[in-house]
Amino acid sequence: MGGLTTLSGFEYVAPTDLAAAATALRDAGGRACVLAGGTDILVQLREGMRAADLVIDVKKIPELLQLDYATDSGLCLGAATPCYQVNTTADVAEAYPALVDATRIIGGWQIQSRASVGGNLCNSSPAADSIPPLLVYQAVCHLAGPEGRRSIPVHEFCTAPGQNSLQPGELLATLTLPPQSASAGSAYQRFIPRNEMDIAVASAASWMELDDSGSTIQSARIALGAVAPTPVLAEEASQFLVGKAPTEENFAAAGALARQVASPIDDMRGTVEFRVHLAGVLTQRTLALAHRRIQES
Amino acid sequence: MAKKTHVTTTINGEETEFLCEPRQSLLEVLREGLDLTGSKEGCNNGNCGACTVMLNGLPVDSCLVLAVEAEGAEITTIEGIAQQGHLHPLQQCFLEGAALQCGICTPGFIVGAKALLDRNPNPTEEEIRFNLAGNLCRCTGYDKIVRSIQEAAERLQSAT
Ligand SMILES: Cc1cc2nc3c(=O)[nH]c(=O)nc-3n(C[C@H](O)[C@H](O)[C@H](O)COP(=O)(O)OP(=O)(O)OC[C@H]3O[C@@H](n4cnc5c(N)ncnc54)[C@H](O)[C@@H]3O)c2cc1C
Ligand code: FES
Ligand code: FES
């Protein structure tokens, strides 16, 4: 064969039924892996970071390709629905701007045509761009396994770098995001050394809802990426904002509190000190942007 | 060796059948099985875009698609961009605008740019750069590529 680096051999199945996929996954006993857009898993298989005897393509299962949105019920997002489709669905982009801030920067267009939010979550990288937005929207993960179904809040999903609470044979079927009121706004930003196509050094998502007068924050949530073993909610910073005015001073104070949940590592992308600093700055900026978006809507 | 799978797909408008192993990427099968060597391998991990093809109308890195996933799909490769022996305006403008040097990145840029112009016939410079951020070029410095795409967009629009 020619010079292309190849994957080692495996069988491939593309079931159309979720229960069949879960059974196949369980029966293979750890020697199977799920294929959604393949932008993580095919790289990992090729580089030998993972091995598989069976690849289960879930893109033929209709439930996993859903993108159902209604203003009163919110979003039901199939685990394998590609980012490109999320980005180009206008009412979804309008209701969940922080999610789309993330899905628009996961790789370039070629990656977004394939990469799914579900795959981003199941790969469970501390730097995964879609997870902080899912945290601030309080998304719910709907799982399907050979024994049946269960649902867990997204903040219980990731457990360590690359690890999550999926049990053997269990798949992520859908994610649901609650409906958004007109007085809610959100934003996601990351810091990378270039504009596109890189992994976050640190990131933050912010969500807030104002009261009827628009002068007081009724509820707020802040989540950070790439500064801890999993993406994390900054609870204290979020609570601090409740009942306060949406001002730059309060956003800066929330940023300072958010820094306290950052327990990052030193690596080639950034030092501990720099990442902690970024956590504060990105919190402040995303709060300001979330607020601006409420005013503009 | 794993048993081969039979795949039926449409490539550049023609129904095509091939046998492949599940582990083979679409890029591998295009280049080595079907002799469609226009799609290039730069990185084989989704970073460079040299292997870009359209899969059901959307640009993808064919190094990150399994060939078995092409079952029932419509694929357009660089070989399908010129029509009836005539270069596509994008190809013509890349030549005239010196938008290539070694040429490894060119098929990926042309397919990606075609996907963009199919959806957005009059993109801004920023939209071109954003949508082609997944295509890397180590030779040209990108400016000539961007200008050639803008020129092609103008020609396509004045032709319709
Ligand atoms: C060039 C390039 C750039 C990238 N840039 C970014 C970036 O900027 N930000 C970022 O966050 N990521 C980035 N990534 C990583 C990757 O694209 C994302 O994590 C993507 O969202 C993964 O989705 P996928 O559908 O391709 O997942 P896959 O690769 O198909 O799957 C990912 C993992 O999840 C598992 N899985 C998938 N679906 C399910 C399911 N339904 N149930 C159970 N398990 C499942 C798979 O087995 C695998 O372990 C990049 C990757 C590349 C190659
Ligand atoms: S060869 Fe596919 S992206 Fe580089
Ligand atoms: S012309 Fe050489 S990489 Fe682009």
Image (spheres, coloured by chain):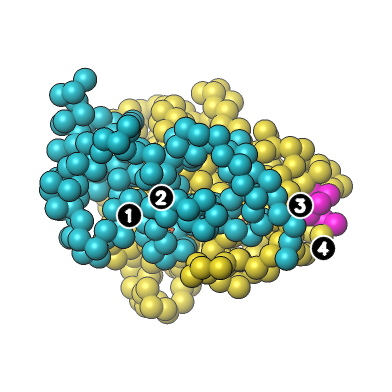
Estimate the x, y position of residue A35 in percent, counting from the top left. 64, 52
Measure the C-alpha gap from mark 2 to mark 1. 8 Å
Amino acid type at mark 1 = Asn
Q: If you read the primary sequence from the N terminus, does the residue marked by circle 2 or circle 1 appear first?
A: 2
Circle 1 sits in a helix, a strand or a loop, which is it? Answer: loop
Estimate the x, y position of residue B9 in percent, counting from the top left. 58, 38
Find chain A in the image and tell me its colour: yellow
Tag nearer the camera, 3 or 2: 2
Residue A170: give its label: 3
Amino acid type at mark 3 = Glu
Amino acid type at mark 2 = Thr
Residue B135: give its label: 1
For the magenta stretch, what is the residue range? Answer: A22-27
Q: Could you tell me if residue A184 is visible in this image?
A: no
Question: What chain letter is assigned to the residue under label 2?
Answer: B
Which residue in the protein does label 4 denote?
A29
Question: What chain letter is assigned to the residue under label 3?
Answer: A
Residue at left offset 69%, top offset 37%: A61
Amino acid type at mark 4 = Gly
